[in-house]
Image (cartoon, rainbow, N blue to C red):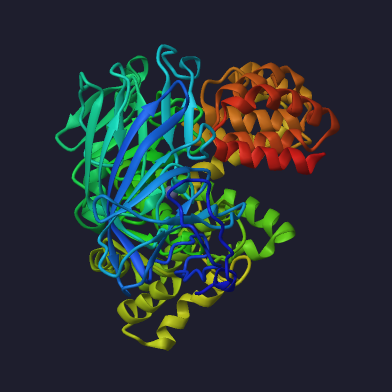
Amino acid sequence: MRISVFLLVLSLYIVGCNNTPKSVSPLKINAGNDPHSFSNFNDAIIKKLNLNLKVDFENKILTGFAEYDIENKTGGDKIIFDTQNLNIEAVYIDGNTKTDYVLGKSDSIIGTPLVVNIKPATTKVKIIYKTRPDAAAIQWLEPSQTHDKQFPFMFTQSEAILARTWIPIQDSPGIKFTYTATVTCPTNLMALMSAENDTVYHADGVYHFNMPQPVSSYLMALAIGHVQYHGYNAISGVYAEPGLLNACANELTDMPAMINAAGELYGPYAWGKYDLLVLPPSFPFGGMENPRLTFATPTIIAGDKSLVALVAHELAHSWSGNLVTNATWNDFWLNEGFTVYFENRIMEKIYGKPYADMLAYLGYKDLEETMTDLLEHNPDDTKLFLHLENRNPDDGMSDIAYEKGRLFLKNIEAIVGREKFDAFLKNYFEENKFKSMTTEMFLNHVRNELFDGDTAAYSKINARAWVYENGLPKNYNAPQSAILFKVQQDADAFTKSGNTAVIDTAGYSTHNWLQLIRTFDAKLGIEKLAALDKAFHFTQSQNSEIQCVWYILAIKNNYDAANAQIENFLCNVGRRKFVRPLFAALLETENGRAFAAKIYDKARPTYHAVTRETIDEMMANAK
Ligand SMILES: [Zn+2]
């Protein structure tokens, strides 16, 4: 799909550097077909990146260059990169030839195009630049914000369109390139990237990286901190701060089994090693599937392996997302719906069907809630294929892409049978590896490969309704969970009696507890909350998932006994999944709004920009 807004003529102006052109005329930007990128990748495209950065913790900046091998497909005289909030200092082509460039008109969402003059035969473009201290992708942490509180830490989060805030790049998921990098950091810290990583410290603080397989820009990632490595075997292990490494290593022992299970399902793992880096708690997401090195929140370390489904999810992205990638952010469900489906299949293989069914059911419950909310406020966002032009692609990162996407795939599986669907998926990943995929391409693939082009048979999966219509189609198989049905019965009995003895908690994992708490609503009342708290110590829980749902219930019931812990939690955990619903619950009432404002004053500086942006907007709307 081509988006009209990017066909407009952008008026460009000269930036204040000596080496910029003496005269500039309005330039017609020959856009690609991604509404969230200025780049003209249909004309001139990046093929390989050589990144060289020095890390300055004191000033919170990265300084260096991005040198690209490019393909000038049409022999034109311009290549356009995406930038946002970068200081561009000089641009060279084909070695040492300084070239003219202009920074175009900025857009508040997608940033500023960097238009570089090239020659028809140009093969190399080198951009000298610096990041700024408030680069949205980068989080700089004081030692006090880390687990061990000894050394500073920094990490990047590029998805969806933040790579352009730390690298001038053609920032579209539809473009893939290989990369090498050299990163210089303080000698007491280790640098890691979404690439081949070392497991030991380099005395000179200089780290070299190689990513031989092509990746999209949103998978560019860098982390620097005082971390150590624990290897499980030759191809997998975990990095974490020394004080957290043991707990992480014990929690994630099933990683090698997961890699095997995933490979048995959908073909060999394509990236060499699969390691996981456990970050400090301000990381805004659960995990980020940076190739070879998943970044993960420490909130998954529950002590009983009950939250490791997140690792299955990020690992599954090694196929769906990293190998076969959504071509634009409008096709985001292709990344996430597939991954949630695949994640559940890995969990089923390792932990059994009842456990996997329980996880699927919980995801479905989340979907129901999101669906009700969106159908009321933003019904078009309940489609799988979205129209995010002129919007931040983060707006599309809801349960719709994840859980409605999974449900669609699960329903195809139910119609054609698992064996046939698995064979189709395995072949789909093999045929399309290291390529990008649009929603229409995928549906064509399903029609042709899974139904041999038989349109009548294909119509049984009701693809149009799932993908292009609001809500859920009339007939579909909703997930069921016998385990959680029993939990719900016990919860109902408690609501009637107020007696905690009616709840049989033998064998409970995190998910049973979550289901129990979620069954209760705003009418439960302070007395019954106090009884539950006395029996199960929810307010003092150290499990972030349980804390989050319990604190929401507490807020809805005005159970002030949890207030101190709510404040403490929000000031220490920056994962958006928890922070957003807690602030939403607080902002429902006048007292809550005052409490939320007080907490946010303290917590805001500790959050990543991704989380900050979400909460800023919620606070502004609540006024
Ligand atoms: Zn994901």
Seen at 41% across and 87% down, the residue is 455
Seen at 49% across and 39% down, the residue is 285
- Residue 539 spot, x, y in % from top left: 63, 20
- Residue 613 spot, x, y in % from top left: 62, 41
Foreground residue, 263 or 290? 290
In this rendering, the answer to whether 576 lies above or below 568 is below
Foreground residue, 201 or 147? 201
Residue lying farthest to the front in this orientation: 22
Foreground residue, 533 or 366? 366
> Which corner quadrant holds the C terminus?
top right
Q: Is residue 407 left or right of residue 435?
A: right
- Residue 501 spot, x, y in % from top left: 62, 24
Q: In which quarter of the image is residue 280?
A: top left
Seen at 62% across and 52% down, the residue is 108
Count every numbered label the image shows and give the total: 0
- Residue 283 spot, x, y in % from top left: 48, 32
User: Is residue 559 visible from the viewing direction of this image?
Assistant: yes
User: Is residue 300 visible from the viewing direction of this image?
Assistant: no
Q: In this view, does 290 lie to the left or right of 544?
A: left
Foreground residue, 112 or 121? 121
Q: Is residue 1 left or right of residue 273?
A: right
In this rendering, the answer to whether 149 lies above or below 30 is above
Residue lying farthest to the right in this orientation: 590
